[in-house]
Image (spheres, rainbow, N blue to C red):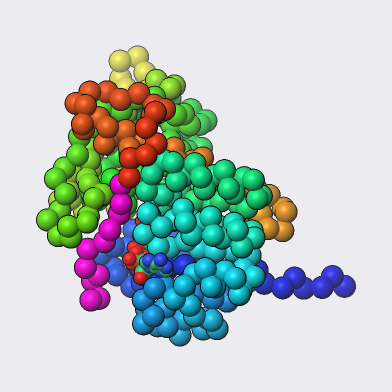
């Protein structure tokens, strides 16, 4: 009889919101997505993954996390954790300007898979370093694209409808979000690429004033327009003050709206001058599964050599590059063509007060 495989050893770097606490904050709950949204409960639902260690510079946060998830080893220095724990998988859940240094240290410590939160980094140059280091070492670099929506069945169904001509030819998309372009916006940009199946070639964007709280807060809200290589256009509506996250996807013969409170497919019907718009039941032939669980199952399958991840560093970098083009466009006042020559612009995501603090 085959030996039961030992669980893969997981280390968590950063024990804050996305490690576990975001699931406890109902106003931030994403809706339309099966829970859990966060990493620790998702790992606990995948039998061949075990969180064996957690690191956070805030000792109290690290200890509370470890107690909650029965994690045996706690560190304040992630490098020490990497040296001691022989980890197979690391979740990188620290602020974006630390993703690169943590990923490079994980590669150095021969970790086999890095599961990195979005935005992937704080500069494109950092993203490039992460991609190169992981490629050279054979480390899986799985970026949480679309905040997991690349793995969510509703969104996969929507793409299948688009790809099979279910709304005719894709013409234009509107993405609606609130908050920072890097923190929240990159997830929507990931999804625009996912639906369009094409790369953004140019961007016209403008930024909103930074929030007054926190002098170091650099990530800013933005709105603007995008053109894709295949002719599709998109509007990015990122003005603050609205609670909805939504994609409105229009084709020549139909429309999909998908977001936190909507899942709708409409199509043109009839002909001969009697065309009308008909709403359809959105196809849902599946049992809802947390995309976070799906990603972690996929990482386990990658480590067993069964398949590749659908995500890689290049996709994580692509939406960051679009976001950076918004910044450049805000400065120049005109359309900005991709790829960007300047990979050094840094946009840091820092956080405001926590709801539980
Ligand atoms: N996919 C999503 O839905 C989603 C949601 C929220 C945040 N995020 C991303 O997840 C990452 C973390 O965000 P968060 O909201 O959980 O932030 P957070 O501030 O709640 O948690 C980050 C934790 O990292 C710790 N930390 C900081 N520097 C460290 C270091 N050098 N070593 C170890 N620990 C360190 C902090 O003490 C804190 O506990 C960010 O990249 C963010 O953009 C993704």
The residue drawn where x is 59% and y is 70% is 83
Which residue occupies the foreground of this view, 29 or 265?
29
Which residue occupies the foreground of this view, 331 or 25?
331
Q: Is residue 271 shown above or below 29?
A: above
Residue 290 seen in the current view: no
Q: Which residues are magenta?
A: 347-357
Which residue occupies the foreground of this view, 140 or 194?
140
Q: Is residue 8 left or right of residue 352?
A: right
Q: Quadrant of residue 135?
A: top right
| Quarter of the image with the C terminus in it | bottom left
Q: Position of residue 46 (x, y in %)?
A: 59, 68
The residue drawn where x is 25% and y is 76% is 356
Total numbered circles: 0
Q: Is residue 119 shown above or below 228?
A: below
Q: Residue furthest right?
A: 1
Q: Is residue 101 left or right of residue 184?
A: right
| Quarter of the image with the N terminus in it | bottom right
Which residue occupies the foreground of this view, 181 or 174?
181
What secondary structure is the magenta-colored segment mainly? loop
Q: Position of residue 184 (x, y in %)?
A: 31, 50
Q: Quadrant of residue 172?
A: top left
Q: Quadrant of residue 84?
A: bottom right
Quarter of the rendered structure image containing ligand 1: bottom left
Q: Position of residue 321 (x, y in %)?
A: 39, 36
The residue drawn where x is 52% and y is 48% is 130
**Magenta span has 355?**
yes
Q: Is residue 276 left or right of residue 108?
A: left
Q: Position of residue 81 (x, y in %)?
A: 54, 73
Residue 306 seen in the current view: yes
**Magenta span has 30?**
no
Q: Is residue 47 shown above or below 142?
A: below
The residue drawn where x is 46% and y is 44% is 127
């Amino acid at each position: 009889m085959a030996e039961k495989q030992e669980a893969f050893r997981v280390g968590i770097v950063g024990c804050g919101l996305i490690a576990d606490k975001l699931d406890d904050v109902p106003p931030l709950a994403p809706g339309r997505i099966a829970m859990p949204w966060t990493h620790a409960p998702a790992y606990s639902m995948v039998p061949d993954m075990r969180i064996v260690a957690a690191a956070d510079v805030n000792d109290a946060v690290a200890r509370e996390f470890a107690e909650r998830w029965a994690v045996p080893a706690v560190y304040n220095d992630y490098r020490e954790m990497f040296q001691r724990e022989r980890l197979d998988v690391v979740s990188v859940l620290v602020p974006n300007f630390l993703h690169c240094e943590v990923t490079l240290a994980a590669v150095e410590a021969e970790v086999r898979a890095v599961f990195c939160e979005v935005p992937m980094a704080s500069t494109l140059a950092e993203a490039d370093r992460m991609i190169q280091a992981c490629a050279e070492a054979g480390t899986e670099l799985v970026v949480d694209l679309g905040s997991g929506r690349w793995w969510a069945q509703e969104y996969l169904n929507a793409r299948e409808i688009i790809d099979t001509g279910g709304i005719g030819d894709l013409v234009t998309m509107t993405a609606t979000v609130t908050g920072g372009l890097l923190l929240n916006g990159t997830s929507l940009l990931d999804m625009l690429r996912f639906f369009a199946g094409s790369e953004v070639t140019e961007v016209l964007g403008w930024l909103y004033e930074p929030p007054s709280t926190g002098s170091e807060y650099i990530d800013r809200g933005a709105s603007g327009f995008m053109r894709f290589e295949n002719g599709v256009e998109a509007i990015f509506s990122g003005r603050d003050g609205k609670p909805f996250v939504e994609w409105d996807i229009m084709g020549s013969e139909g429309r999909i709206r998908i977001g936190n409170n909507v899942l709708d497919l409409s199509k043109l019907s009839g002909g001969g001058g009697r065309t009308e718009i008909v709403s359809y039941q959105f196809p849902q032939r599946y049992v809802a599964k947390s995309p976070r669980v799906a990603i972690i199952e996929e990482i386990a399958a990658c480590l067993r050599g069964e398949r590749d991840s659908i995500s890689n560093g290049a996709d994580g970098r692509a939406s960051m590059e679009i976001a950076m083009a918004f910044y450049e466009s805000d400065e120049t006042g005109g359309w900005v063509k991709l790829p960007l020559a300047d990979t050094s612009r840094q946009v840091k995501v820092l956080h405001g007060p926590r709801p539980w603090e």
